[in-house]
Image (tube, helix red, strand yellow):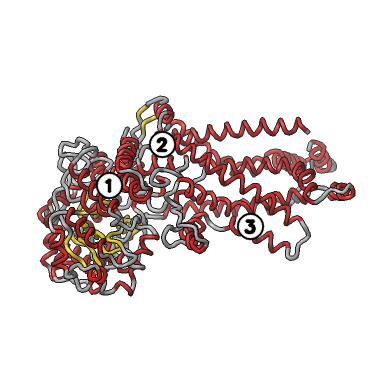
Amino acid sequence: MTPAWPSGPYRRRALVLAAAAALLLVVSVLDGCARDGSDDDAGHHRRTTVTIGTFGVFGYRQAGLYEEYERLHPDVVVKESVIERNDAYYPQLLTHLAAGSGLADIQAMEVGNVHEVAAAQGRLFEDLSRAKGVRRADWLPWKWAQATTPDGRTIGLGTDIGPIALCYRKDLFRRAGLPTDREAVGRLWAGDWQKYIDTGKAYARRAPAGTVFTDSAAGIYNASVHAYPERYHDRSGRPVYMDSPAVRTSWDLAVQAVRAGLTARLKQFEKPWDQAFANGRFATVACPPWMLGYIKEKSGAAGRGAWDVAAAPRPANWGGSFVTVPKAARHKAAAIELAVWLTAPAQQARLFERQASIPSTPASYAMPAVRDARNPYFGDAPIGRIFTTAARSVPLLVFGPGEQQIGTAFTDIGIAQVEQQGRSPAAGWAAAQKEIKNAVDE
Amino acid sequence: MTATTTAVEGAEAGPAGRDRDRPAAWRSRLYRWDLRYSPYAFVAPFFAFFAAFGLFPLLYTGWASLHRVELTAPDRMVWVGAHNYLRLLDNDFFWNALRNTVTIGVLSTVPQLLMALGLAHLLHYRLRAATFWRVALLTPYATSVAAATLVFVLLYGRDYGLVNWALGTLGVGPVDWQNGTWSSRCAVSSIVIWRWTGYNALIYLAAMQAVPDELYESAALDGASRGRQFLHITVPALRPTILFTVVVSTIGATQLFGEPLLFGGAGGQKGGASHQFQTLGLYLYEQGWFYYHLGRASAVAWSMFLLLLLVAAVNVLIARRLRKDR
């Protein structure tokens, strides 16, 4: 039963060393964790570090906005922490909110989430409508309303929006005998998504080999459904996802497209979708402004000059974000000031220049940087004019709880079953409704 | 241990004077404490961490599963008793996930262990560059789930995937690996098989090397072929090892998560358009982190835990039976 390890002073020294090493490790790890996101004494005099948590690519840093703000406010340092995907960012934000710690001074929020946060947790955020320098009239009314709580507090200032246009390939349209000029193309389907489907059928009759009209039925559904004020909930907050005209009409359009074989049966934002861009597999895709960069990247040099942008059948909005200031923020005053500055029309216009994020402030639309913007990759399309025209006509969307869950039940379950798995539309519809019941039921 | 301690005490205390007596006694007491308690001190960090990050979450999850808790306001817990569990009982999505977990578990575990056994048998022969083969077997295990799965997703692509291209050259029509019911389950299983076969083979190999050579020699003298030797010596000798790998693989199969999640691409937590490869792990994730029902997700987690206990009990019974048979 003698211990196997060496004994005597040697052993004790080893023990002390090991204990010291372990202690050092623990302390340094804890220290490292604790330091994350706290204040630091940058430079020689003490400066305030304002932290901002975002997801995806907001572009503030890339557009040099933090740098400029720091130049204007020498006592402020801006520190951004980014989580790439919103479906990882948002749950983390919720747990931090509940814990009341770990929050950045400014937290970005996606449009699909901001409503439920405003409704359920609005009291945990600053009312930014009262902040100095905020003029409600600067924002599009529907954007402003999305982040406003039932009792009239506005917890988020709008950043970008996602008015929808239609990206199409001129080369494929020409070979299919369709017009290629963007005004003429826009006229093909102006006012009604049904005309878009009819154009698709015309395309299919003379489609260049190996190509189809559009990427996915879910894309059509999304672009169509977001043009209606009441989609999943009506103005009184009653759920109407079972039979609202918005859902019914958009569902029928998607099913028609599948039945007529107009889609490439792809899922958006997956690898095969990227590959299909590269291979020029489909001729049109409903595109919010933030998708233009994606199309350019995936289509590559081969797509230069082939893609163009036309107006969508009906003005709709897909995506967009807000910045909020939690009440638990460490530097509330500085955070509010920065949030107001970042979302002011001039800064939103700068962001548009950098990465084509359409401002949610119409005052930016008159600025030359936006008004005269053209995109060389898309045949010099006047994207500033196209997207801002759509933005002004987007209806005031009604949001309710479980917006994203309901939406994906239609696109990823219902329509996917019809499009990808060849089930009947009735079966797909029933599956989507069942999915929603399971998702939103408390 | 007692013997050693007394001897040391005697040796140190014996010839010393009065003034040296006390420190010596103190030292010997320290020494005794050291012997008696330092083992606990050494294992304490593990148990402290386990209590904080294993036991507490386990119990708290159980507590949460008896409440309605939503991620949108996790600090508001409403007592609902067994509601979350009762709801699972008549929830098609839960049973579907359970069925998928079992199906994919069988589809991946059985071929994986059989192949591992065969590979280990081959590696047990005298081979050129034996170390190279053994290391090569272990490389899939050393890759990350995410990296491996993402590569498999490309291979299994419907339109531009390598597998369908190969099938096409053989004249077999393209398979929609992600959307087919069985094709998707096979694809997910294949990723698991690819990652874990080598690992199990090495465990089997280690066990095989512990089987005494004399057994094989005498069997060879009796005229038993290689195949018979494998069936009648190797497999029986490996029984405890096989049981171990079965238990470990079953636990792994029950928790299957990363592979189907990433295989599903965007919205992978649904496990396909008709949830055809949604495992219990994915269902838990979907309920908790996409539908924000933390209480319900906790109930799924505890159901999985109870299920594993059940499987473990069955394993113990089988092991006991096997021992009796011998």
Question: Which residue is label 3 attached to?
Answer: B138
Q: Can residue A257 be seen?
A: yes
Q: Residues within 10 Å of mark 1 (few under 14, many from 20)?
A: many
Label 3 sits on a secondary structure element that is helix
In the depicted view, which residue is nearer to us: A194 or A394? A194
**Spatial separation of the CA atoms under disc 1 and disc 3:** 44 Å
CB under 8 Å between callouts 1 and 3? no
Label 1 sits on a secondary structure element that is helix
Question: Which residue is label 2 attached to?
Answer: B93
What amino acid type is highlighted by mark number 1? Asn
Label 2 sits on a secondary structure element that is helix
Q: Which label lies toward us, 2 or 1?
A: 2
Q: Can residue B72 be seen?
A: no
Have a look at marks 2 and 1 and say if they share a chain: no
Placement of A255 over or under A374, stated as above or below: above
In the depicted view, which residue is nearer to us: B119 or A151? B119
* Residue B16 falls left or right of residue B148: right
Q: Which label lies toward us, 1 or 3?
A: 3
Question: Which residue is label 1 attached to?
Answer: A113
In the depicted view, which residue is nearer to us: A297 or B80? A297
**Spatial separation of the CA atoms under disc 2 and disc 1:** 25 Å
What amino acid type is highlighted by mark number 2? Phe
